[in-house]
């Protein structure tokens, strides 16, 4: 057992389920070349080819199919046994998966002010810029996702709409002399690599064509706003996530008009997850905070 390549076995299970190296790398929090190396190590260890490359991803070979049919359930069993063996304090926590910027700029400040309203519910937050697969994470009670929905294997409800408007640093605005949305056509735009449609959707509502100038993308909205505050370009501000930057004066709105995006925040849980008093308590608190902010 000590000689088994466990990291490679884990990578094999994740890749087999994702069918895509990039998605598997995101779930494992490693690079795509690192995932490939782990698969190669396992193939050498087994003396068999496990995947065939396809135009849009990977497919299991016959040997890979047979190995995965036996290994997948076994690996799930290892994961569930490990979760069950964790300390009672950790298991009692209500665990939520959230994108980092929503956690830092919206959720955490409200949790800090509402311990009594949560009636003793201990909320544990796990942040990730990627969509976490709830079907593979029994330790997660729910997730807060930004997008259109629905997501496979889960049910959710829309609870927070998103309004978008361009923002930039005061110095950038002064240097570029931005007077109307059309002035953004040739400027450097900053956006999210996970949600590349924010700028095009805003431009469509504003009636202007974008993309004639440079484009910078980051995998984290916090970095998007930090880059804009540093004067690297204009960012697409998502309200309420961008508000701390506006309130501090590091960013300013370019114009008063905003656009309600098609994407919004959803509270999501697995379809096989039985609703509990803890989930009901968290959902009620979340909806109350949204109503209070509105």
Image (cartoon, rainbow, N blue to C red):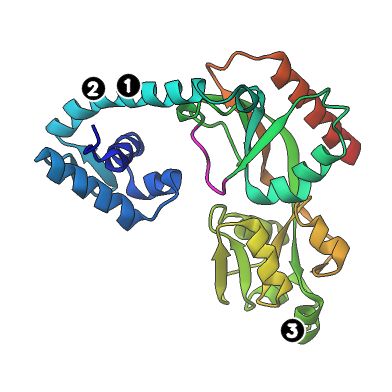
**69 or 242: nearer the viewer:** 69
Rendered view: 162 above or below 243: above
Q: Which residues are magenta?
A: 128-133
Disc 3 from disc 1: Cα separation = 58 Å
Left or right: where does residue 219 sit relative to residue 223?
left
In the rendered image, which residue does mark 2 sit on?
70
In the rendered image, which residue does mark 1 sit on?
73
Quadrant in the picture for residue 144: top right
Q: Are marks 2 and 3 in contact (CB under 8 Å)?
A: no
Q: Residue 122 placed where, x, y %?
A: 73, 28
Callout 1 secondary element: helix
Return the residue found at the far bottom: 175
The residue under the point 42% across, 45% down is 28
Q: Residue 67 placed where, x, y %?
A: 19, 28
Callout 3 secondary element: helix
Q: Earlier in the sequence, mark 2 or mark 3?
A: 2
Q: Quadrant of the N terminus?
A: top left
Rendered view: 28 above or below 192: above
* Crowding near the residue tagged with mark 1, few <14, some 14–19, many ≥20 C-alpha atoms within 10 Å: few
Q: Are marks 2 and 1 in contact (CB under 8 Å)?
A: yes
Numbered badge on residue 176 = 3
Which of discs 2 and 3 lies nearer the camera? The answer is 2
Callout 2 secondary element: helix
The residue under the point 31% across, 34% down is 13
Rendered view: 84 above or below 199: above
């Amino acid at each position: 057992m000590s000689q088994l390549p466990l990291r490679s076995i884990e990578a094999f299970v994740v890749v087999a389920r994702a069918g895509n190296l990039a998605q598997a790398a995101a779930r494992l929090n490693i690079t795509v070349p690192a995932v490939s190396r782990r698969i190669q190590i396992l193939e050498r260890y087994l003396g068999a080819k496990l995947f065939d490359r396809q135009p849009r991803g990977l497919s299991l070979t016959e040997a890979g199919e047979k190995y995965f049919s036996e290994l997948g359930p076994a690996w799930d069993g290892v994961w569930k046994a490990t979760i069950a063996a964790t300390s009672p304090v950790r298991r009692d926590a209500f665990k939520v998966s959230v994108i980092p910027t929503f956690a830092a700029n919206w959720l955490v400040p409200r949790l800090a002010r509402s311990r009594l309203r949560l009636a003793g519910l201990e909320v544990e937050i796990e942040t990730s810029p990627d969509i976490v697969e709830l079907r593979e994470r029994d330790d997660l009670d729910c997730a807060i996702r930004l997008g259109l929905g629905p997501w496979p294997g889960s049910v959710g409800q829309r609870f927070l709409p998103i309004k978008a408007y361009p923002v930039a640093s005061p110095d950038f605005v002064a240097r570029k002399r931005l007077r109307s949305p059309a002035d953004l056509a040739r400027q450097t735009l900053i956006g999210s690599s996970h949600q590349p449609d924010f700028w095009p959707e805003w431009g469509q509502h504003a009636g202007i064509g974008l993309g004639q100038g440079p484009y910078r993308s980051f995998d984290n909205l916090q970095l998007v706003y930090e880059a804009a505050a540093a004067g690297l370009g204009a960012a697409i501000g998502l309200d309420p996530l961008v508000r701390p930057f506006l309130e501090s004066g590091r960013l300013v709105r370019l114009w008063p008009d905003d656009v309600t995006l098609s994407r919004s925040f959803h509270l999501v849980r697995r379809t096989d997850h039985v609703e509990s008093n803890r989930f009901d308590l968290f959902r009620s608190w979340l909806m109350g905070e949204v109503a209070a902010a509105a």
